[in-house]
Structures are given as structure tokens and as C-alpha cells.
Image: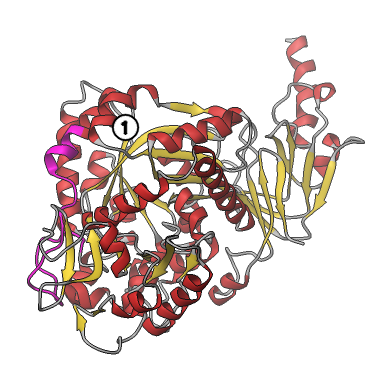
């Protein structure tokens, strides 16, 4: 009993100073970095808020008030006074595309284009600077935001002729903001072998005018004609050139993420070849953001290679590969989302099933066999229902495997009867707050007011049913900015000044959890990150304003001050 009392007397003052990991103050370590005088929202229910924290060897060793951190400060400790600024767990983007984000920085940025004429003008300028035969690439146009084109249209799209006139010898391929359609010129169609006789592929459509001629718009799987031509052109380049370009794309994506407070990135689909490059960079400790990657490749290669590609915490915790990505349908904007009933504005179609249900069931078996999560893009209510059915069938034959944490990516438009099925089966809804406010002005036109209100971006209904929502931006479809995404999630405020069914908004605490702890949970990483607690990774974002309390309109004026990954400051606002 005497020894017990002595140890207790030693332990009590240590607990009071924040030395939570150690049994005696003599063992108190010297921190590498200490944050002081801030408001730290931890996402840890046992200790929801603190004023200061200490970091050593990339992990949090103490949280408490600023006075208690003095015990951890030595001659070599870096000290940062936050001056009352907000620190939160490092933001995770729960669904985005790393290579797409990087390449978007290298090609024409069409996200701010407001008319078809402006789009053509940008291509004209690029063509004048391009080498003969060089492909002109861009991304970010959205026909709902470009106004009415001049001249004749088909399904709201203009013909390729204006593009072809300004770039007759250089092939042009411009990705829609959604990534589910492309706009091309005549040269690109020539290289892709597209003629009047070319048939639509399963799960895709070539938009044609009244004479049956392709107008230059390719939806979903029809993009392959042009993509294959671009791959053939790339094959003429050296492997060194291609590799250098890919590395540059990853680096640009990381720079953008760190500048916007993102410490973890759920990459929504990379090929085996691209994952090989990520593995190489991880082995060389060249990754600066923590990547969690979904594999996307052919069914044949999935069967052959998946068993060898599961990776956990390579590169000092900067690379995990433990999921498979699939698509059941397309996007709502291009009428590719697979619906239970026809589109309101195009009643001749109910969307597209882009991957056969048979193949999707086969991939589900591959995921189970190799302990990989299955993450399926499903936007329309039919697409979501079909995937919920496939998931539940797979779970029934899972031989007792539990806690699989399979995900549906987007889950944008749900039939009310299917909302409760996410919680019932433990399926995670991986959604994007900013999609709601970006798409909101035209969603009712696509599916009607009744369906939009009942099942479009129904975060509140999912949360109240007990489902887990992880939040992301789908960059480069949207800006990778988590603060814009947070604002959209808590306000549902659209650019036209109206709110998209505001009753479905998240609270600020729910919104922050969806992009921190929920994102970690959705990746089986909640024990290492997603909240700020002793023993967890020191991934932290410091903001100029308190987004948990300021008026909503000020959220968009908030800046990232520091982005800390692994206890290292990897971005600082200058």
C-alpha cells in the first residue's frame, strides 16, 4: 500500500500538467513542437477542447492549457503561439482524384469560363502556342453554367465546328467538370476513328445532330474512343517523360492540398501502374500528404493483381492502398446518373448503367477475398439501390467477416426507402457537400422538385438514421478547398443566394467530424488520426478564424495559417 501511495503522489502532479502518457514527471519528454494559446477542437469526446498541445516524433504527447505545456519545452523545442486561432484535426478529403487534381493544374482551367465563346477563345490561344499535332487538354466546363450557345444545338450542346475551326490540326479534348463527358474537335474524332457509323458503346453515348453526325460531345463510356487515341499519342513519348509528368502531377496536387489545410487524401481511383509510382515515392519518403488509395483497373487485372497490392501505412504512414473503386452509373449533369424513373427534362432516358451488375458482383467477390473495401460511384437512385443490393448479397456470403466498411461514393440521390439501408448494412455514405450547392440550381430541373426534396443530398436523413457520412470535394470536379466544402455543408447556400433544402444541412460539429474523424473511420484509420489525442498522429490544421462560431458568411473568408503533417509544418501562410 505504501508503494502505491508514493506512485500516486508522483502521478497526480503529472496529470495536472498534461503529462498524460507517463507514470512519473522524471520521464517527461522534450517536445519537438508546442502549440500554445489557441482554441483546439479535438474531435475527441473525452477531451473535446484544449488550449495547447505538445508534439514529439510526429505524435501528440500532451494536450492541456498553455501553462501545462511548459514541462515539455526544451532548448530545441519550436513554439508557436496561436493567438487564439483555431486548430482542428488535419482536414481529410474523403473523395477526390489526386492525378486529376495535379493534371488540372497543368492543362486549361475551364472552371471559370462563363460562355461557349470564351471556351473557344481559350482553345484558340492554346492552339496558337501548341506544337503541331500536340493535344490540347482542359477540364472544368459545365454546360449548365455556360449559357445558351449561339447557333444550333443538340441536347443543349453546340456542335464542334467552332472548336475545329480554331484548332484544325491539334486534337482537343476538354473534360466536363463532372469528369463524365468530354467536348472534342474534329481532329480528335478523326484520331479516335469516330464516324457516322460508329455505334454507341454499352454505358455510353455519342451525342449526334439531327443528321446523325457526332457533334463532339461524348458521354460516359463513349469517352473511350478519344481516350484511346490520346493513349496512342502518349505511347510515342519516352517512359521517362511520362513518369516525370505523373510525378509533377502528384506534387502539384500535394501543394494544393497543403495550402488548403488537407493532411489526408482519399484518392478515388488509381490504376495499378499509378499505384506503383505512389509506392516508389513512399519508399523514398517523397510523399507529403497521407494518401489512402482505391484501386481502379480492368476486371482482368483486378483478379490477377489485387492480392498483391494491399498496402498499409507505407512511407511512414503516407500511403495506404486497401480499397477498390467501381462505377455503376454516371453523373446527373450529363443525364448519366441511373434513375428509377425518367429524367424530368429528358423523359426519353433514365440514365446509364456504366458497369454491368454481373461485373460489379464479381468485383465484390474480389474485394472480399483480398480484404479490400469496395467503394462504388453511385449517383442516381437506381444506381444506389442496385449497389446496396449487391453489397448486401456480398455480405451474406462473407463467411462471418464483419466491419467491412464498404462505401458508396456520392450517394447523391436516394429513394427514401433506401436511406435506412446504409446503417443497417454498415455502408458508409461518402458524399460531397460542395456538390449540393454547385449542382443545386439545376437539380430540380433534372429530377423534379418532389424527388429532389425527398432524396437529393439528404445528409440529415442519413445522419438521423445512424449512417456514417464522410465528406470530400471530388476535386478536380470541384475546388479541393475544405472550407468551401464546410460552408456548403452547414449552409447549403447556392450561388444564386438560395438554400437547397436547408433542413438537410449538417451542424458545424457534424460537418467537421465528417471531414476528420469520420474520414479516418471510413479508411480504418480512426485509431491513428481524425482526432487530436495523446498518442495519435500530429496532423493539424490551424485556421485564421473560428469556423465553429463565426457568422456563416465569414467561413469563406477564413484562411489556412498552418498545415502540420506528422508534427512537421508543411505549409505556413506568409
Location of residue 556 by image quarter: bottom right
From which residue to which does the magenta span run?
336-362
Work out whether residue 282 or residue 440 is closer to the camera in this orientation and state it. 282
Q: How far across and how far down the image is residue 457, in percent?
A: 31, 63
Residue 457 in sight in this render:
no
The answer to if 207 sits in the magenta stretch is no
Please say whether residue 339 is one of the residues in the magenta stretch: yes
Asked if residue 498 is positioned above or below residue 184 in the image, the reply reads below
Determine whether, in the image, residue 108 is placed left or right of residue 335.
right
The residue most toward the left is 348
Q: Which residue is drawn at 49% across and 71% down?
A: 126
Residue 375 location in percent, x, y?
31, 42
Residue occupying the point 18% across, 53% down: 383
Secondary structure under badge 1? loop
* The N terminus sits in image quarter: top right
The answer to which quarter of the image holds residue 376 is top left
Q: How many labels does the image show?
A: 1
Quadrant of the image for the C terminus? bottom right
Instruction: Judge whether residue 531 can be spotted in this image.
Output: yes
Residue that extends furthest to the bottom in the rendered view of this protein: 150
Q: Is residue 211 above or below residue 373?
A: below
In the rendered image, residue 484, in percent from the top left (x then y), is placed at 51, 66
Q: Classify mark 1: residues with Cα within 10 Å, few (<14), some (14-19) or many (20+).
A: many
Compared across the picture, whether 37 is left or right of 342 comes to right
**For the point 76% across and 29% down, which residue is it?**
12
Main SS type for the magenta part? loop
**For mark 1, what is the residue?**
404
**Which of 12 and 31 lies nearest the eye of the viewer?**
31
Q: Residue at x 29, y 27 (%)?
A: 402
Left or right? Give the position of 263 relative to 237.
right
Amino acid at each position: 500500500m505504501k508503494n502505491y501511495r508514493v506512485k500516486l503522489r508522483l502521478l497526480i502532479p503529472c496529470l495536472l500538467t498534461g503529462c498524460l502518457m507517463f507514470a512519473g514527471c522524471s520521464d517527461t519528454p522534450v517536445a519537438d513542437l508546442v502549440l500554445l494559446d489557441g482554441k483546439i477542437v479535438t474531435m475527441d469526446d473525452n477531451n473535446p477542447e484544449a488550449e495547447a498541445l505538445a508534439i514529439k516524433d510526429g505524435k501528440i504527447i500532451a494536450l492541456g492549457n498553455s501553462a501545462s505545456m511548459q514541462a515539455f519545452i526544451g532548448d530545441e523545442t519550436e513554439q508557436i503561439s496561436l493567438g487564439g486561432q483555431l486548430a482542428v484535426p488535419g482536414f481529410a478529403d474523403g473523395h477526390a482524384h489526386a492525378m486529376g487534381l495535379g493534371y488540372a493544374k497543368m492543362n486549361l482551367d475551364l472552371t471559370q469560363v462563363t460562355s461557349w465563346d470564351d471556351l473557344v477563345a481559350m482553345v484558340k490561344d492554346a492552339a496558337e502556342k501548341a506544337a503541331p499535332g500536340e493535344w490540347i487538354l482542359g477540364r472544368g466546363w459545365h454546360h449548365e453554367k455556360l449559357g445558351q450557345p449561339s447557333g444550333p444545338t443538340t441536347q443543349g450542346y453546340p456542335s464542334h465546328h467552332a472548336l475545329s475551326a480554331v484548332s484544325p490540326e491539334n486534337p482537343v479534348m476538354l473534360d466536363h467538370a463532372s469528369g463524365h463527358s468530354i467536348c472534342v474537335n474534329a481532329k480528335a474524332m478523326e484520331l479516335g476513328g469516330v464516324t457516322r457509323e460508329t455505334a454507341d458503346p454499352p454505358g455510353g453515348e455519342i451525342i449526334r445532330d439531327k443528321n446523325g453526325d457526332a457533334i463532339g460531345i461524348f458521354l460516359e463510356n463513349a469517352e473511350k474512343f478519344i481516350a484511346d487515341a490520346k493513349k496512342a499519342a502518349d505511347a510515342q513519348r519516352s517512359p521517362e517523360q511520362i513518369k516525370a509528368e505523373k510525378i509533377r502531377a502528384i506534387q502539384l496536387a500535394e501543394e494544393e492540398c497543403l495550402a488548403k489545410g488537407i493532411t489526408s487524401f482519399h484518392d478515388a481511383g488509381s490504376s495499378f501502374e499509378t499505384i506503383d509510382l505512389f509506392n516508389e515515392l513512399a519508399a523514398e519518403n517523397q510523399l507529403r500528404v497521407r494518401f489512402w488509395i482505391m484501386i481502379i483497373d480492368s476486371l482482368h487485372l483486378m483478379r490477377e493483381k489485387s492480392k498483391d497490392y494491399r498496402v498499409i501505412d507505407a512511407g511512414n504512414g503516407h500511403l495506404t492502398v486497401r480499397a477498390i473503386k467501381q462505377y455503376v452509373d454516371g453523373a446527373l449533369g450529363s443525364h448519366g446518373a441511373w434513375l428509377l424513373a425518367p429524367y424530368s427534362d429528358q423523359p426519353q432516358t433514365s440514365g446509364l448503367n456504366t458497369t454491368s451488375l454481373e461485373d460489379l458482383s464479381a468485383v465484390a467477390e474480389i474485394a472480399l477475398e483480398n480484404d479490400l473495401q469496395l467503394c462504388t460511384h453511385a449517383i442516381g437512385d437506381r444506381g444506389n439501390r442496385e449497389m446496396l443490393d449487391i453489397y448486401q448479397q456480398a455480405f451474406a456470403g462473407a463467411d462471418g467477416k464483419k466491419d467491412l466498411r464498404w462505401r458508396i461514393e456520392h450517394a447523391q440521390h436516394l429513394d427514401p426507402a433506401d436511406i435506412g439501408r446504409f446503417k443497417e448494412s454498415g455502408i458508409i455514405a461518402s458524399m460531397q457537400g460542395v456538390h449540393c450547392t454547385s449542382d443545386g440550381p439545376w437539380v430540380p430541373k433534372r429530377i423534379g422538385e418532389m424527388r429532389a426534396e425527398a432524396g437529393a443530398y439528404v445528409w440529415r436523413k442519413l445522419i438521423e438514421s445512424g449512417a456514417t457520412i464522410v465528406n470530400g470535394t471530388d476535386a478536380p470536379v470541384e475546388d479541393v478547398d475544405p472550407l468551401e466544402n464546410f460552408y456548403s455543408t452547414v449552409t447549403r447556400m447556392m450561388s444564386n443566394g438560395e438554400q437547397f433544402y436547408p433542413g438537410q444541412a449538417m451542424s458545424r460539429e457534424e460537418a467537421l467530424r465528417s471531414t476528420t474523424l469520420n474520414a479516418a473511420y471510413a479508411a480504418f484509420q480512426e485509431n491513428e488520426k481524425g482526432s487530436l489525442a495523446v498518442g495519435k498522429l500530429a496532423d493539424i490544421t490551424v485556421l485564421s478564424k473560428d469556423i465553429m462560431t463565426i457568422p456563416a458568411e465569414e467561413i469563406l473568408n477564413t484562411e489556412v495559417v498552418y498545415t502540420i503533417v506528422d508534427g512537421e509544418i508543411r505549409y505556413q501562410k506568409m
